[in-house]
Image (cartoon, rainbow, N blue to C red):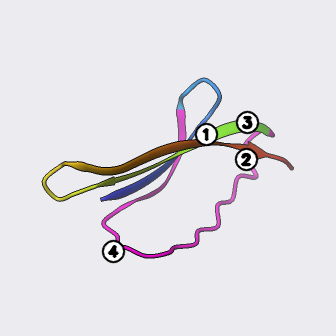
């Protein structure tokens, strides 16, 4: 399963963009964040095998500007 979540500066999950099994490859997603305040957010990308083993886990920051 691949999960892409967005968190606010307090570490609270504000949006789950993807939560489904995906094959290896490149994907593009457009996210409408018009209802959210400008500022710093974090996104976390996690890939987990069918047995539950974490294959990939990365968290990075992003800045939302309107």
In the image, 26 versus 33, the foreground residue is: 26
CA distance separating discs 1 and 2: 16 Å
Residue at (66%, 38%) from the top-left corner? 41
Residue at (73%, 47%) from the top-left corner? 35
Please tell me whether mark 4 sits on a helix, a strand or a loop: loop
The circle on residue 23 is 4
- Mark nearer the N terminus (3 vs 4): 4
Task: Identify whether 35 is placed above or below 19.
Answer: above
- Mark nearer the N terminus (2 vs 4): 4
Task: Identify whether 3 is placed above or below 10.
Answer: below
The circle on residue 35 is 2
CA distance separating discs 3 and 4: 30 Å
Q: Sort mark 2 into few (<14), some (14-19) or many (20+) by Cα contacts within 10 Å.
A: few
Position of residue 28 measured from the top left corner of the image (x, y, whole percent): 58, 72
The circle on residue 40 is 3
Magenta stretch contains residue 24:
yes
Please tell me whether mark 2 sits on a helix, a strand or a loop: loop
- Circles 3 and 4: CB distance less than 8 Å? no
Residues shaded magenta: 13-38
CA distance separating discs 1 and 3: 7 Å
- Circles 1 and 3: CB distance less than 8 Å? yes
CA distance separating discs 2 and 3: 14 Å
Q: Is residue 10 left or right of residue 26?
A: right
Position of residue 36 measured from the top left corner of the image (x, y, whole percent): 72, 43
According to the image, label 1 marks what residue? Answer: 42
- Mark nearer the N terminus (2 vs 3): 2
Position of residue 62 measured from the top left corner of the image (x, y, whole percent): 70, 45
In this view, which residue lies farthest toward the right?
A: 66
């Amino acid at each position: 399963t691949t999960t892409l979540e967005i968190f606010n500066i307090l570490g609270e999950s504000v949006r789950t963009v993807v939560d489904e099994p995906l094959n290896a490859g490149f994907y593009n997603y457009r996210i409408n964040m018009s209802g959210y305040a400008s500022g710093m957010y974090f996104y976390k990308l996690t890939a987990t095998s069918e047995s539950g083993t974490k294959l990939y886990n990365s968290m990075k920051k992003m800045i939302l500007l309107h």
